[in-house]
Image (tube, helix red, strand yellow):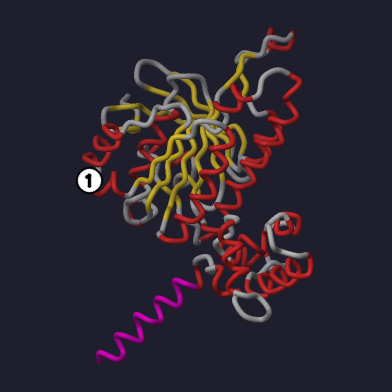
Amino acid sequence: MQAAAEANVAGLEVEEEACGPLMIGKLEGNGISANDIKKLEEAGCHTVESVAYAPKKQLLSIKGISEAKADKIQAEAMKLVPMGFTTATEFHQRRAEIIQVSTGSKELDKLLQGGIETGSITELFGEFRTGKTQLCHTLAVTCQLPIDRGGGEGKCLYIDTEGTFRPERLLAVAERYGLSGDDVLDNIAYARAYNSDHQSQLLLQASAMMVESRYALLIVDSATALYRTDYSGRGELAARQMHLARFLRSLLRLADEFGVAVVITNQVVAQVDGAAMFTSDPKKPIGGHIMAHASTTRLYLRKGRGETRICKIYDSPCLPESEAMFAIADSGVTDAKD
């Protein structure tokens, strides 16, 4: 009986391993030494997927990796990670298993057909006081809930660029869901980013942490604030967009590799050209087309009456363009009272 129970546990562990990312150590052997693995880990590649998804140029930039070695490493990684064609039926089945994290508001969850999707980037944009940071704080708690309660059963990584992270808000949300405040705070890894280079560097640390423990959510609030000050004027626009594109690509890679939900907030800019006269709302998100193409789902938040806020689906590959109303209460994001 005990042997059967042990075999069952071992089977579950194997199954869990098959679902999650493969550790980089699995590449050892077949002409790839432990020293090569160490070099890859130092460069921020902690999983087989990160090597398989990386362009060859990135591997060649690692000190001590020759062209022949890069080819060998990628060939071995591609044997372990399925990267070819699959049928739409199989992909549809995989999509059906995607976990969604509740936002705390039933109306908002209904709009998003379940909540914030894991494995993709969701962008929240709007002017100040529209609830972007409050929504992030609520999600940081709800992602720790069991799956049957609308959670992701995982920890949260929070990168703050504006200095607006407040643990007191998390404790208030935790109380609403009947969770232990200390446990909730222990499950949130927080980092303050001080410049755009530091912001990108933190993602390397994030990938190392995701290998060690199960994370359900990665929040960057705000993804673009530091770029607005680190790069100024049209002269630096191309450099800014290139750096931002690389940062967003790293986020997407983390979402693909570890299946975490990535939530980024974005600021808006007022349009002051002639076309602004003919639009009812002359605000648009910053970051241009690079930001627009990187985000899977874009949500536009705006103020309503009193504590109510309105969320509109601005862009999504599968959600219809519609709106929902939610409210910001002491206990985080909730449904608006009629």
The type of residue carrying mark 1 is Asp
Above or below for 115 versus 94:
above
Q: Quadrant of residue 90?
A: bottom right
In this image, 141 relative to 37: left or right? left
Look at the image and tell me whether residue 317 can be seen. Answer: yes
Q: Which residues are magenta?
A: 1-17
Tag 1 residue:
182
User: What x and y, as percent, mark residue 184?
Assistant: 28, 46
Residue at screen point 49% across, 22% down? 302
Q: Main secondary structure of the magenta part?
A: helix
Q: Give the quadrant of the C terminus.
A: top left
Q: Give the quadrant of the N terminus.
A: bottom left
Residue at screen point 42% across, 41% down? 158
User: What x and y, as percent, mark residue 85?
Assistant: 72, 67
Look at the image and tell me whether residue 322 can be seen. Answer: no
Above or below for 300 versus 316:
above
Front-most of 25 and 271?
25
In this image, 113 relative to 89: left or right? left
In this image, 329 relative to 12: left or right? left
User: What x and y, as percent, mark residue 262?
Assistant: 51, 45
* Badge 1: residue crowd in 10 Å (few <14, some 14–19, many ≥20): few
